Image: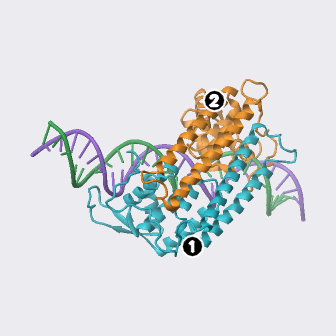
Chain colours: A cyan, B orange, C purple, D green
Amino acid sequence: MSAIRLLVLGAVRQHGRAHGYQVRNDLEFWGAHEWSNAKPGSIYHALKQMAKEGLLLAHEVAPSTAGGPPRVEYEMTEQGAEEYFALLRQALTSYDQKMDVLSAGIGFIVDLPREEAVALLRERLARLDEWRSAVTDYYTPENGPGQLGHIGEIMNMWVHSADSEGAWTNGLIARIEGGAYTFAGEGEPFVGILADDEPNPYAAPR
Amino acid sequence: MSAIRLLVLGAVRQHGRAHGYQVRNDLEFWGAHEWSNAKPGSIYHALKQMAKEGLLLAHEVAPSTAGGPPRVEYEMTEQGAEEYFALLRQALTSYDQKMDVLSAGIGFIVDLPREEAVALLRERLARLDEWRSAVTDYYTPENGPGQLGHIGEIMNMWVHSADSEGAWTNGLIARIEGGAYTFAGEGEPFVGILADDEPNPYAAPR
DNA sequence: CCGAGGCTAATCAAGTTTGACTAATCGGCT
DNA sequence: AGCCGATTAGTCAAACTTGATTAGCCTCGG
């Protein structure tokens, strides 16, 4: 899974109704163009594709109020919301070495209830552990270690990274359980989107 | 950059001459199907594409000696070797959060002279440091930190991961400088390929 | 008042990735 | 002899990604 669908769905959801350029700006605001494949082409493609699949509803809209070609606005459907939460849960639990997916998941984690967030992160820990033993088993065949030469360094790196990610995840769980942040159903949520007229201070250099 | 070209070039190079299925088996032997996009389609595509670009030379070959459709064997060209080393150096120095690329680079690091390997890894450390400050600057705007809510956790994760990778890289540098492994020009290299008739103990489940 | 440059919004072709599928041959079993 | 399943080798369509490009409108200096 790439992070693009989750990012786009999350952005549309926060706006209620958004056109492609708005999504693109939000993702830049979040720095997503730095750590994921959130480039214009991918964003517009994802919007169209998900509209075709019924996850989004496309509204053809009159020419832009601010220059440029006519815009298409998108709204989430019921089905889109389901897909959004499915992707979000997956992003938080599955360890597939893709940091961008996890980043996107963290960005939207507060859309879940606090307990569920913690539970999902604990599941992530379990998955990390599985992966860790898979790696050590795989690369420690009957002949014992040391048969691998420098190839063993690849295993070493993966184990090191799994351990580091585990430590970080534990820290996050502690902070969340300690009451940090505002989760679903806990009142005024944190909003990370740009107002319609606000300039984006973190825009990608163009 | 994805890891596939580097992996395929490296595999072909170790064989001298190889057909797609051989490459595919090697990559499975290295576990690359677990941590990279080394799936059949990608492998065959990369071979064809690189042949078209002049990095590989394709030899149409008689029907397989062991069943299946006729095979095409590939050999590296001069240009392919250049590309291989360029990709390898890039994989070892550039920090673009893609663990698969680094893994591939580590797998072939012994194709370089020992000093160059160390130098490249030191450059990686410098890049990591740059990335780290970029992240902290980016997410610590004039208003001071704490304006970010849970979004700050994304930054936290990236910093944590950069630090962890830095620590691991330092360890690797130390091992290499301590004389570990056999690098280019130091005698009998370690070979990580399968003989023509050897079964692959790590094959992907099919 | 006009044209250069910049912003807004989106498209496009080329390349890449995915996962399922095809097809040929061999070994063994009945 | 006939056939089943495993192995070998590769193909294909559909989806996705990338980077460049288009095109309308606004603003500002000269």
Q: Is residue A64 above or below residue B187?
A: below
Residue receiving disc 1: A113
Q: Secondary structure at mark 1?
A: loop
User: Is residue A129 visible in the rendered structure shown here?
Assistant: yes
**Disc 1: which chain?**
A
- Return the mark for residue A149: none
Query: Which of the two residues, B171 or B36, is positioned nearer the viewer here?
Result: B171
In which quarter of the view is residue A131 placed?
A: bottom right
Instruction: Look at 57% across and 37% down and name the residue there.
Output: B50
In which quarter of the view is residue A177 placed?
A: bottom right
Q: How far across and down, in percent of the image, does residue A153 sit?
A: 73, 41
A76 relative to B82 in the view: left or right: left
The amino acid pointed to by label 1 is Pro
B133 relative to B56 in the view: left or right: left
Q: Quadrant of the C terminus of chain B?
A: bottom right
D25 relative to B86 in the view: left or right: left
Instruction: Look at 45% across and 68% down and name the residue there.
Output: A13
Query: Which of the two residues, D20 or A139, is positioned nearer the viewer here?
Result: A139
Residue receiving disc 2: B119
Q: How far across and down, in percent of the image, does residue B145 sit?
A: 48, 55
Q: Secondary structure at mark 2?
A: helix
Mark 1 touches mark 2? (CB < 8 Å): no
Instruction: Look at 44% across and 67% down and name the residue there.
Output: A14
The amino acid pointed to by label 2 is Ala
Q: Quadrant of the N terminus of chain B?
A: top right
**Disc 2: which chain?**
B
Query: Which of the two residues, B81 or C5, is positioned nearer the viewer here?
Result: C5
Number of other residues with Cα within 10 Å of mark 1, as a class: few under 14, some 14 to 19, many 20 or more: some
User: Is residue B43 visible in the rendered structure shown here?
Assistant: no
Rounded to the nearest angstrom, the CA distance separating label 1 from label 2 is 48 Å
